[in-house]
Amino acid sequence: MGLGHLERLRRAKDVLTERGMDTTRCGLACFSAAGFSDALKAEAERGHVLLIGLDELCGRATPTVVLP
């Protein structure tokens, strides 16, 4: 999974904001059983997205980055 997915989520959030919804506390998260690109992992390290992989989905791990 790459940055294209994150960009679609950001656009969806922008559309909701434009329609008058309060998205100030809205976080973005990507779920994948196949893993994430290095670029998406870098975005997660900067706190821009929460990544939930197979280990987290199965309860074998907790997310390493938590959104503010």
Image (cartoon, rainbow, N blue to C red):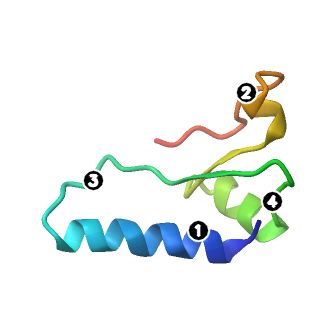
Callout 4: SS: loop
Q: Please state which amino acid type lies under the numbered disc 2.
A: Thr
Q: Earlier in the sequence, mark 1 or mark 4?
A: 1
Picture layout, residue 34 above or below residue 4: above
Sort mark 4 into few (<14), some (14-19) or many (20+) by Cα contacts within 10 Å: some
Q: CA distance from mark 3 to mark 1?
A: 17 Å
Q: Earlier in the sequence, mark 2 or mark 4?
A: 4
Q: CA distance from mark 2 to mark 4?
A: 16 Å
Residue at the location (83% across, 33% down)?
Answer: 55
Expressed as whole percent of the image width and height from the top left, the position of residue 59 reads 76, 22
Expressed as whole percent of the image width and height from the top left, the position of residue 32 reads 75, 51
Q: Residue 21 falls in which quadrant of the image?
A: bottom left
Picture layout, residue 34 above or below residue 6: above
| Residue furthest to the top | 59
Callout in the foreground (3, 4):
4
Question: Which residue is tagged 3?
Answer: 24
Callout 2: SS: loop
Question: Which residue is tagged 1?
Answer: 6
Q: Please state which amino acid type lies under the numbered disc 1.
A: Leu
Callout 1: SS: helix
Question: Which residue is tagged 2?
Answer: 62
Give the number of the disc on residue 36: 4
Q: Residue 66 falls in which quadrant of the image?
A: top right
Do the residues under discs 3 and 2 have CB atoms within 8 angstroms? no
Sort mark 1 into few (<14), some (14-19) or many (20+) by Cα contacts within 10 Å: some
Picture layout, residue 16 above or below residue 62: below
Sort mark 2 into few (<14), some (14-19) or many (20+) by Cα contacts within 10 Å: few
Residue at the location (13% across, 65% down)?
Answer: 20
Q: CA distance from mark 3 to mark 4?
A: 26 Å
Residue at the location (66% across, 40% down)?
Answer: 65
Do the residues under discs 2 and 4 have CB atoms within 8 angstroms? no
Left or right placement of residue 65 versus residue 18 in this view: right
